[in-house]
Image (cartoon, rainbow, N blue to C red):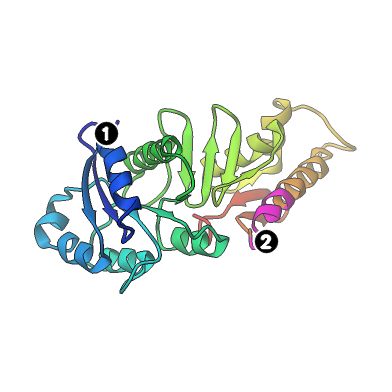
């Protein structure tokens, strides 16, 4: 995937930046580097670059003189440069990660991570960008990885992360989340239960006994996401019918 891929690195660290650029170049990426955010802004906001889209990925540091990486990203978005952005920074507090994702960054990686991990995250970021459409809705990559804002859903390993933190779900809980995310609509209690147990499986007391099972399941799922993010509210209840994975400012 690295062949022909164009990356811009913006980082004022004169020790770290050359090492990163060297590793990226050795991996086959075409790299332009800027030691200051104002230089990057002047170059990347030029009409020719914006019009041609001659750029696949931005790798931004956060804490830089003049503009922060977040401010740089916001300025670039204002001039129409919608290139996917990945923050690579030593600031690993969750508040920075949340701010980056809310601003439209596609990933947030700590500088202490190995280059092998960074390269894999770059590959995922690029595959997500290619799979997404103009509406900004996530789609699943050929590898079975779906990225939707702070949510990453990996069908191959049945793993889910939220804001780059693992959410420990059982297989049944994973299936319920995957069903809601892919459906993009209200999903009935019956659909969720059928995805777990098979069509028309009887459970609980009475013909609608399965609803109590689904409610308990979704309650556990919510609690596990809240353990990672106390502000999590992406699962919305439709009373008397079922649930929806909510698309909105906070999560998707």
- What secondary structure predominates along the stretch shown in magenta? helix
Q: Residue at x 40, y 63 (%)?
A: 62
Give x and y (percent) for residue 81.
24, 59
Quarter of the image where the N terminus is located? top left
- Nearest the camera: 231 or 246? 231
Q: Image height check: is 162 above or below 230? A: above
Q: Nearer the viewer, mark 2 or mark 1?
A: 1
Binning the other alpha carbons within 10 Å of mark 1 as few (below 14), some (14 to 19) or many (20 upward) gives few
* Left or right for 138, reference 176: left
Q: Image height check: is 159 above or below 73? A: above
Give x and y (percent) for residue 72.
31, 66
* Left or right for 227, reference 51: right
Image: magenta residue range: 223-231
Estimate the spatial distance between the alpha carbons at disc 2 and disc 1, rounded to whole Å.
41 Å
Report the residue marked by disc 2. Answer: 230
**Number of labelled discs?**
2
- Nearest the camera: 44 or 181? 44
Report the residue marked by disc 1. Answer: 26
Q: Residue at x 74, y 27 (%)?
A: 197
């Amino acid at each position: 995937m690295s062949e022909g891929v164009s990356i811009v690195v913006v980082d004022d660290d004169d020790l770290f930046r050359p090492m990163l650029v060297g590793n990226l170049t050795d991996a086959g990426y075409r790299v332009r580097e800027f030691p200051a955010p104002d230089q990057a802004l002047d170059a990347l906001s030029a009409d020719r670059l914006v019009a041609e889209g001659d750029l696949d990925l931005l790798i931004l540091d956060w804490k830089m003189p003049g503009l922060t990486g977040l401010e740089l990203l916001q300025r670039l978005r204002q001039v129409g440069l919608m290139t996917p952005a990945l923050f690579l920074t030593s600031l690993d507090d969750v508040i920075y990660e949340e701010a980056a994702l809310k601003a439209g960054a596609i990933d947030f990686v700590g500088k202490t991570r190995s280059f092998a991990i960074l390269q894999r995250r770059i590959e995922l970021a690029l595959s997500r960008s290619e799979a997404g459409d103009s509406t900004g809705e996530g789609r699943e990559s050929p590898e079975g990885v779906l990225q939707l804002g702070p949510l990453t859903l990996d069908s191959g390993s049945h793993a889910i992360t939220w804001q780059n933190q693992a959410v420990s779900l059982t297989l049944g809980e994973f299936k319920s989340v995957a069903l809601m995310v892919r459906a993009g609509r209200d999903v009935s209690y019956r659909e969720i239960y059928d995805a777990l147990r098979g069509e028309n499986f009887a459970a609980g007391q009475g013909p609608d006994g399965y609803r109590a099972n689904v409610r308990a399941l979704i309650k556990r799922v919510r609690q596990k996401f809240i353990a990672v993010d106390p502000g999590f509210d992406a699962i919305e209840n439709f009373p008397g019918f079922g649930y929806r994975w909510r698309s909105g400012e906070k999560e998707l």
